[in-house]
Structure formats: structure tokens, C-alpha cells
Image (cartoon, coloured by chain):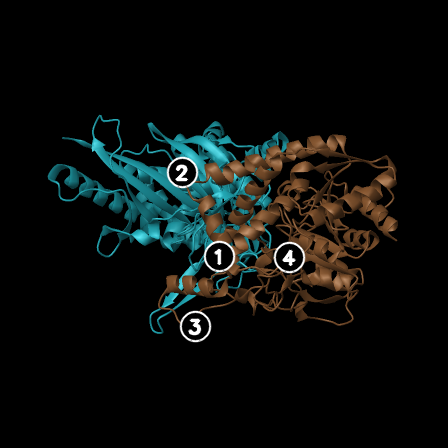
Amino acid sequence: MKYELVIGLETHVELSTDSKLFCSCGGHSSPKEPNDCVCPACCGMPGMLPVTNRHAIELAVKAGFMLNCKINQYTTFDKKSYYYPDLPNAYQTTQWFNPICVEGSVDIGDRKIGIKQIHLEEDAGKLVHDEATNTSFVDYNRTSVPLIEIVSKPDFRSSEEVITYLKRLKSALQFAGISECEEGAMRCDVNISVRPEGSTEYGVRSEIKNMSSLSEIKDAIEFEKVRHVDALERHTEILVQETRRWDDVKRRTFPMRNKETAADYRYFPDPNVMPIVIDDAWLEEIRKSMPATADEKATYYEEMGIAPKEAAVLASDRKLCEVFDAVVAKGCSAKTVASWILTECMGIMKRLEIASLDICPDKLARIIELVEKSEITRASGKKVLSAVFEKDVDVDAFCEENGLNSKVDESFILETVRKVIAENEKVVADYKGGKVKALQALFGSVMRELKGTGDPAVIRSLLETEVNK
Amino acid sequence: MKYYINEICSSGNIAVDDNLLVKDVPATAGSKMLESFIPLFSAEVVERLEKAGYGISGKTNVSEFGLGLVGETSYFADAEDKKLLGAAAELVKDGKVKAALNVDLNGAPRRASALSGVNFLKPTYGTVSRYGVIACACSGEQVGVTAKDAESVKEILTAIAGHDSKDGTSLPAEKYEYTLGEDVSSMKLCVITELYDKASDEVKAKLDAYIAKLTAKGAKVEKVSLDVVFAAQTAWQILMSAETCNNLSRFDGVKYGYRTPEYKNIDELYVKSRTEAFSFLTKATIIYGSDALSKDKYNNCYDKSMRIRRVVLTKVKELLASYDAIITPVCSKAEYEAYNTEDAFMKVFEESLFTAVPSITGLPAMVSGGVQLIADSFKESTLLSIAHTAEKEEA
């Protein structure tokens, strides 16, 4: 019998806010020393009351727009109770009854993955275990950092689809400035079951908790698929609905202790957080602040005359877009800028092993301007660009110091041309004997003598005149 | 009896319940759990009084987390007390302080002021900041003022009321103006028969005498039926217990407060710390509330109670459209005797029949001359004026 995978994802993403969800402690860019970023509210002291972070609400709405959701303009917060030392209030404030976004979708090539809901919630702290002293320590820096949980419908049919979806999600969220999606800032719970192909019933489901690496997610899904199919085909085990974790060393999943999972969370509306009403004006304000999506950007770039392939590469990366847009805004031609970014910048980045384009757009614009006006050669332009990447040099000063200016005195070029002709009697003879290519060798020698400075057109015309004298 | 759990300054003129935070002074909320807990900041109401020039005399004894009748379930209470009285109300009665701030989450300060014969006003929900209240029942609890006369209640309430950005449920008005000068002679008041009938003869006589003073001034008083009072009592018990269960779960022995000396693992740390530090009534309330919130019972208990809350509010508002205020008893008896610990939960539940309507609706309520007056939202001036008029009659 052929089997079909059925997968649904719950993806937790940290929001790029300056403060926590319900207090004014620093949020996203929290300090690295344990418990540096806490206040009586987020470490669970009595007497404190939550004050909702407006920016977090806006980012969650933006996520809803990105994933084609319906925005609930009346949304509420609820308390989820459980005891764990990393949860100082012994409850997490989340959205159980009225989540902020519902009914969305994400395109993954030829298929659409349904989004059941997006809800806001606060993160928990972190436990640090010291084996040496057999002691556990708790760090509350992360408690109450705002997260969104994106709950998909069980629409995935393969691990590849899951990976494509997660990549799409990441680029969409980064693009709209909703989340930095840094290492570990995007975590998934994978709900997985298997059923005979064509069946509409769901099989017994296992949930793999807290995954962040794409390759591990893929491996865990493949492992579970085999385990489920084996159980159904060869009765290797009786499947039960359970929570499992991936062990990256043993390369397999293990059931989690029942105690960690079997809980009644006693959800109820948080009386201290007033329902959030997002009126039409506020919703419109948020909509207006949305950047174009990657697809919209790519289309827009194509309309500017950029080849579809190049437009897609530019549009896929927020940093590339930012630099491109800024340089074009300075008056450079779109095609030229695209070529500089995709060929020169990315070449240098590859050589220097730089992951993201971090360059001052003004400097790139200046280099392009100098080359376009033939004040420096393209080769010199590359040299400056490289120096900008490596040492963030000043463009004009660098050209000056290194004599890259092409407006070299014409008499100096003439002198150099004459010198080269005098030193290469054989090549000159070849040229005069009909070997046209020999002129190119002479041209190269002059360029070398001039170290890449000097206007190539001027050099060529002087060379032709002199050699034919 | 035990008046203060911690005294601050003998020249202070305002006493503060121990479930309100005063910076750097232990805040126990009457619990062994918080015996050593020292808050890092003061409650907003305390800050406002200090800024206005008042001094805090000390932290008055309260029932553990304010859940008892008047103060009897406090870890620090005097076990020899045969007659139950509220510490803050007694201090006010004896003239030791000008006024006291109390947290009213299930009627305790209202009962205490009735027993001691002083005034207490629980203002409209959202008009006084709850920032710095050791919370139990967030959806209904309010900070109120105990004082000997209506004039002093008005003075202190004016100083503490108004918007606080640190409390998300705080209403937007920056200040509230209160008056004692509303004309009682033209007022129409009503007595709720269901509550009147449940009171002892002594309490009934007190209430009749109070009404006589008002009718002598020209006010009209009628008897009406309001049968939602029983639903209000049960629904508030459920909401109050559930929220208390949730709010007290942070006291787990991990971060601050009492921690059991011997434990093998984290679960034992939780269970033993909480078992050893909480009183019977607190545990009973937690268990009752936890049950009401459980998956299977949520819809029939907690959710239904929230719907009952809306019905009660509608019914009472309907009544208050025809009457300026409602008069009810606030305690079933004129005096409270000490009782067996195991009876605490039922005792408090029974007595809460009289106090539940203002608790669950957030409407303002005032105790004056041993009776309870209830008015519509923001009508504190009506309550103060009636109390003021009755006081003048007495003198």
C-alpha cells in the first residue's frame, strides 16, 4: 500500500520589538548576562500589572498581512497555567480564545498551505543546569519576550514542502521587518501522521517539539515517516498520540516523558489585559507601513528593466533590496546598479566570506558614478569597492591616494605609449606586418604601466596614432 | 488583637493593608509564604498619598491574601481572639489613624467596617489603580478607603483616584471630583428583600434605624426583589477562586518567599513549599478555583460565571435606573465569633451573599452605619452624600 504523509506546523517566531510584551524591559536585543533584562513584572513579583506592547500588536498584524490572513479587529489575551521554574508567574499570557489573525495561506510553488491562525504570546525564561554542582539556575532575560505562533493547517505532504514553507516564512517575516529570524529565533513543533494514499481520515499523530534547524526537521520527518509506515505495515509498534523529541546525536525521535506533556492548562481570559480593538484607521495605518512583498518587488524590478532572474535574486534578500533601492534613488541606472550588486558586490562578498550585503549605499553610488563618468576605470572601481568592504574606506580619498583617477595627464599617457612602443620593437613589427592582435598586447602593456589609470579610449587612440607613425 | 504585621512610623496617619506594597517594607499579605518578601516599589495609591503629604503608619493585618471574613486567617493573627474584627477598621475606630487603605476582593473591609462601625468605600472598578496590590481576583478587586466619617473618605479617595498608566484596566479620567452635598431628601432608595431576609434581627434593626434617618430627611425607601443576588454569589465565588488560584500559583518557592527546607526535586519543592506555607482557606480556594478552570468544567463554571456577571450587571443597572442607591445588610450578624478552620470556606461563601453584587459588577459600594449602600458606576458622590447625611442625623 502507498502511504501519504500529513504534516501540520506550529512555528514560533520572535518579534523585533524594542521591549517585552507586557513590560518595558528590552525585548529583541536583550543583553547577554543572565537576568540583566528583568523587572518585577517579568520575573513574577506580586503587585505588578501587564501593560500591552502596541508595537508587538502591529507586527503580529503585519505577519497576518504577509500570510494573507483575516485580522481579528477584536482580539484578547488569555492565561495558560503550568508550573515550571522558567515561567515566573506560573502562567503564560497567550491568545487562546480570540487570536489576532486567522484563515491565511502561504504559497509554496504549485501548492498552498493553509494558515489556521497566528497568535501572540510571551516567551519563557531559560534554565541552565550545572552538572558539577547538580544545581539548576534560571535566567529570566527571555521571559515575556514577544513571540508569534503561526499555526498551519495539516496541509503538508512531504518534508520538502515543509522546508520550502519555512524558507518562505523566514524570508517573508524578515522582509517585512517582523522578525530578524536569527539562529534559533524560529522554532517549530511538527505534527505528523501517515495514512493510506487517497484516505481522508487522519492517522495517529505524533508531535515533535521545539525544532529549529531545517536539516533536523527534514531528518525528523523522514524518520517519523518510516516509523509510522513500519508500524502500520509490519506492526513494529502500536502508534499512540504522543509528544516526541529529536535526538540529533542518535538521529532519531524519542517519546517525551508523559509528565512533561499531559497537562490541563486551565486557559481563561486575562482580566488584567483589556481586549485589544484594532479599529479601521489603525489597521490602515499598519497596512500602509507594509513593505512590498518579495514577489511584488521582483515584478517592480523587472518593470525597471532588470532581467527576471536578476530581479528575483535581488528581491529575495532584504539587504540587497535596501542597498539597491537606495543607490537607484541616488540617480544611478537600475540596470547598472543591479550589475554592480549582483556581480561585483556578491563576488567580493563570496571571496571575503561575508553573508549579507552591509555597505553604505552612498559609497556604492559614488563608485558607480565615478565609473560611469569615466573618472575611474571599472577595474579601479572594483578595487575601491573591495577596499570599502574590507576597510570601509572613503571612496574619493582612496582614489586620490592610489592614483586611480583616469584623468591622468594626456602627455603622461603619450610618454608611456612611446616608451612601450620603443621597448617592444618585435611586437610593433608584428603589427605592422599585418598581425592586428599585436596592438592589443601593446594596449595591455600600456595599461599595466599606467596601473589601470587613464581613460582606455584615450590610450587606444594615442596608441594607434603613434604606432602607425 | 494583632493590628500591625509591620509598623512603619508611629506618627503616620494612614494605615495600609498588608496586601498593598510599600517599598522596602515586608509585604506578607497575611501569609507565611511572603513573611520575608520585601517589595522593590510601592503601590500607586501609596505613592499618591505620600506625595500628597500623608504618612504611612504601618501594614495592617489581613486574612491570608484577603480571602477571609475580616482578618482571622492571617498567619500572624492572634489565635486567642474570640471576637473577629478587622485590624484597619479598629485602628480607625480608635482614632489611631485618620484613614486606612484596604483591598476589597471579597468584601472583607466592608464587613470589618460594619463590625467596627466606621465607613468604608469601595470605588468604581478602574477608578483607583491596582498597581501594587498583591492580586487575587483581578477582575473585581479594588482598593478602598476606611475612615471615621464620609468627609475623610472623600478626602483620601480624591487623593488616590485617577488614571494610572501602569494599570491596563485603569480608566482614562485623570481626576475625579467627589461631593458630600447631593440632596438626599429627593432621593429614592431601595432595600433588596432577599438580602434583608437573610440578616439577623439585630442587623435588621440596625438597617431599619438607618433607613429611618434617611426617610426623616425626606428620602423615599422601597423594598424590591433582586433574585440574581444568589447567582451573583456563586458566580463571584467561581471567578474569584479561579483568578486567585491563578494569581497565587506564582508563589512556588523558586524566586522569593517561603521554600521548604527539604526537597528532592522540583515537584517536591513546589508541593511542600505551598503545603507548608498556605492556610486552609487559601488551599480550599485554590482547589475550588482550579477545578472551575479545568478543561471539562470551564464552560459550565468559569465561562458561565462571566455570562452571569453580565446578567447581574444588567439587572442591577435596571434597578439603579429607578433608584439612586440600593441599601442592603453587609454582614448576616452584628458580631462574628471565632470558628473552626475547616469551616472557613463555607463561612466566607455564606457571608459573601451580601457583598457579591458590587464585587462581581465593579459598582461602587459604601459601608456606613453598619449597612451597605450600592450606586451606579461613578456615583460615589451619591454614596458619600447619603453617608454624610446619616452621620449628621446621628450627631
Q: Are marks 1 and 3 on the same chain?
A: yes
What residue would you read off at disc 3? B261
The residues bearing labels 4 and 2 have C-alpha atoms spaced at a distance of: 55 Å
Identify residue type, mark 1. Lys
Relative height, residue B203 to residue A197 (above, below)? below
Identify residue type, mark 3. Pro
Q: Name the front one of labels 1 and 4.
A: 4
The residues bearing labels 4 and 3 have C-alpha atoms spaced at a distance of: 37 Å
Residue B322 visible in rendering:
yes
The residue carrying pointer 1 sits among few (fewer than 14), some (14 to 19) or many (20 or more) residues within 10 Å by Cα, namely some
What residue would you read off at disc 1? B283
What residue would you read off at disc 2? A151
Q: Name the front one of labels 4 and 3.
A: 4
Is there CB contact under 8 Å for labels 1 and 2? Answer: no
Identify residue type, mark 4. Tyr
A265 horizontally vs B144: left or right: left
At a point 59% along the width and 65% down the height, the residue shown is B28
Mark positioned earlier in the residue sequence (4 or 3) = 3
Label 2's element? strand
Mark positioned earlier in the residue sequence (1 or 4) = 1
Which sits in the foreground, B271 or A440?
B271
- Chain B: what color? brown
Q: Are marks 4 and 3 on the same chain?
A: yes
Q: Name the front one of labels 3 and 2.
A: 3
- Numbered label attached to residue A35: none
B33 horizontally vs B212: left or right: left
